[in-house]
Image: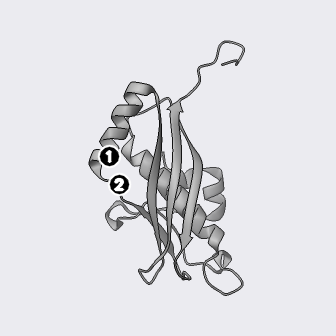
Amino acid sequence: MDVSQLPFNKLIGLESAAAESGFQVSLPDNPQYTNHLGTVHASAMLAVAEAGSGAFLSQQFTGYSGFIPVVRRLEAKFLRPGSGQISARCKVPPEEVAHWAAELAARGRISVSIPVEVVDATGSIVMSALVGWFISRAATQDAHGIA
C-alpha cells in the first residue's frame, strides 16, 4: 500500500520517498507546515512519523492480504526545531520483522512497536518516535454485513 495515497496524507501533501534514500515518506519544504516560530510544526512531524511507520509495515508485509493495521499508540520526543523538508525513516532488525511475520501467521494478530526518526533538510534528527501498531485479520462479514 502506498500510504501517500491515503486521503489525509494526500491532503497534507505527504510524498513517498525514493527507496534508495533510506526514508519511507517526506513532507516537502513548504511554509504551510510551519509554526509561529517559522520551524516545522509538531503536528507535521507527528504525521510524518505515523505515515513512515505505516509505510515501513507495508514494505515488510507485502504478501499479507486480509490484515488490518491500526495505530494504538504514538510516543514522541521533539529533539530540536526542524526546517525545510522533513522525512521519516524506520529501522527494525530483519530478525525482529521475521518474528513478527511468524507470530502473525500463527496467531492472526500481533502488536508491534516501530521506532521512527524524523530528519529535517539539514540532516538533523528533529524528532524520535515509537509507533505502536495492532495488526489483525480483517473480520469476515455475512450476507447482511454482520461480522
Q: Which residue in the structure is indicated by mark 2?
A: 92
**Label 2 – label 1 distance at C-alpha:** 7 Å
* Amino acid beneath label 2: Val
Q: Residue at x 65, y 81 (%)?
A: 31
What is the residue that sits farthest to the left in this orientation?
95
In terms of secondary structure, where does tag 2 sit?
A: loop
Asked whether, in this view, residue 71 is left or right of residue 122, the answer is right
Q: Is residue 140 above or below residue 21?
A: above
* Amino acid beneath label 1: Glu
Residue 27 in which image quadrant? bottom right
Q: Is residue 131 above or below residue 80?
A: above
Asked whether, in this view, residue 15 is left or right of residue 107, the answer is right
Residue 98 in which image quadrant? top left
Neighbor class of circle 1 (other Cα within 10 Å; few <14, some 14-19, many 20+) is few
Residue nearest the observer in this picture, 7 or 114: 114
Q: How is the image coloured?
A: one colour
Asked whether, in this view, residue 9 is left or right of residue 93, the answer is right
Asked whether, in this view, residue 34 is left or right of residue 118, the answer is right
Q: Residue at x 38, y 28 (%)?
A: 105
Q: Residue at x 58, y 51 (%)?
A: 73
Q: Position of residue 146 (x, y in %)?
A: 70, 18
Q: Position of residue 79 (x, y in %)?
A: 52, 78
The answer to whether mark 2 and mark 1 are in CB contact below 8 A is yes
Residue 96: mark in rendering? 1
Q: Is residue 12 above or below residue 146?
A: below
